[in-house]
Amino acid sequence: MHVPDGFFDAPTSVATGVVAATGVAVALRKARAELDDRTAPMAGLVAAFVFAGQMINFPVGAGTSGHLLGGALAAVLVGPWTGALCISVVLLVQALFMADGGLTALGTNITLMALVGAFVGYAVFRLVLVVLPRRVGSVPAAAAVGALVSVPAAAAFFTLLFAVGGTAEVATGKVLAAMLGWHVVIGVGEALITGLVVSAVVASRPDLVHGARGLAGRTTLVTAAARA
Amino acid sequence: MSRERTAPAGHRRFLVVGLLVALLLAGVGSYYASSHPDGLEYVAGRTGFLDSADEDPATTGSPFEDYGTAGVDDARLSGGIAGVAGVALTLLLGGGLFRVLRRRDGSGGHDAAEPPVPADAD
């Protein structure tokens, strides 16, 4: 979903630049609460993993592909603020070294994929976790639903920006329908990858998963039963 | 990375395995990825705003432009090097940033599920 230079007019790019800079500045402060000696290296790994994951485009039909955005995945694994920073770092590396996503569109891309992706993904994850049984095993499923919703949410936000400051004269409804249609399908891929990766991490190191904090793990249950 | 100083031995293995998976995905797996345009690019082409993209952006000429390595002809090698370099750059930037941001008092203070890890691991 990397926006190139030129899609949006200057005022829109400046506005998303301000939103992105503000979001990253707040995240830099808030992420401190999520990061300690154990989670900081994990967060670096999550950023590197999302970079790799974004290179794996999967076909979604009709000559189109999608790839992991990773906002929901990162938010569940290392916390929403740190997760947003992970995606921002990925987008910066992609813009500077891979020419993927324009430099003037970096603010737009951070807003869409880092801020909307991580926070919508994390909010939905938290909501779903409320209705599921309170145990670690619920985390991958809730993460997958968060991921599923985060992709069309970012696509809808792109369309909103396009309606306000798109440089091409294309009917908003047409763009919205196409963006939502394709990104719901891509969201299914995002959900599968996110669910798979989160369940792998939860299975090996549940203590490292931010979204699993405060939930009873299998080990804890066995211990409690043994004591009773 | 300065993993030795920040991570207990218990999860150094986890970090190394995770990094290997990332390097394999970016360095090898990416060759087999779909080369079709992604959702946004496809929609832009179909609804008619793809041409509004800047033909010659400032980042043209980046060392790993379009996930290839300048001067390397073999597609598999060119993409593989770019992928590995991207993972390394992201790890360096992200790892450095999070290392600076982290709380240093060692009071993780949350996880009930934390397995017993020797405090003197490093």
Image (cartoon, rainbow, N blue to C red):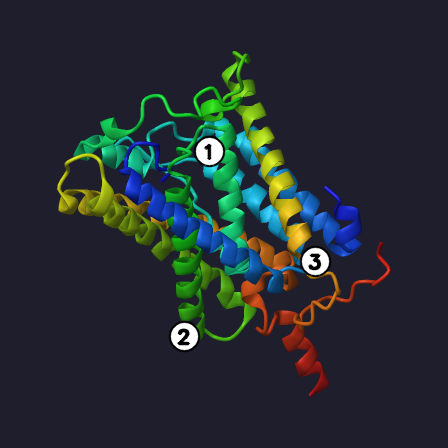
- Residue B48 falls left or right of residue B106: left
Disc 2 to disc 3: CB gap under 8 Å: no
Judged by depth in the image, the label closer to the viewer, 1 or 3, is 1
The CA span between labels 1 and 3 is 29 Å
Of mark 1 and mark 3, the one earlier in the sequence is 3
The residue located at (43%, 22%) in the rendering is B60
Judged by depth in the image, the label closer to the viewer, 2 or 3, is 3
- Residue A105 falls left or right of residue B17: left
Question: Quick check: B3 above or below A7?
Answer: below
* Residue pointed to by mark 3: A38
Using a 10 Å C-alpha cutoff, classify the residue at mark 3 as few (fewer than 14 neighbours), some (14 to 19) or many (20 or more): some
Q: Quadrant where the C terminus of chain A lies?
A: bottom right
The CA span between labels 1 and 2 is 39 Å
The residue located at (71%, 82%) in the rendering is A226
* Residue pointed to by mark 1: A95
Residue B49 place in picture, x, y as percent: 21, 32
* Residue pointed to by mark 2: A131
Name the chain letter of the residue that bears numbered label 1: A
Element under disc 1: helix
Q: Amino acid at mark 3?
A: Arg
Between B56 and B33, the residue placed more toward the observer is: B56
Name the chain letter of the residue that bears numbered label 2: A
Residue closest to the far bottom: A228
The residue located at (75%, 53%) in the rendering is B7
Kindly indicate whether the residues beneath marks 1 and 3 are on one polypeptide chain: yes
The residue located at (42%, 59%) in the rendering is A119
Q: Amino acid at mark 2?
A: Val
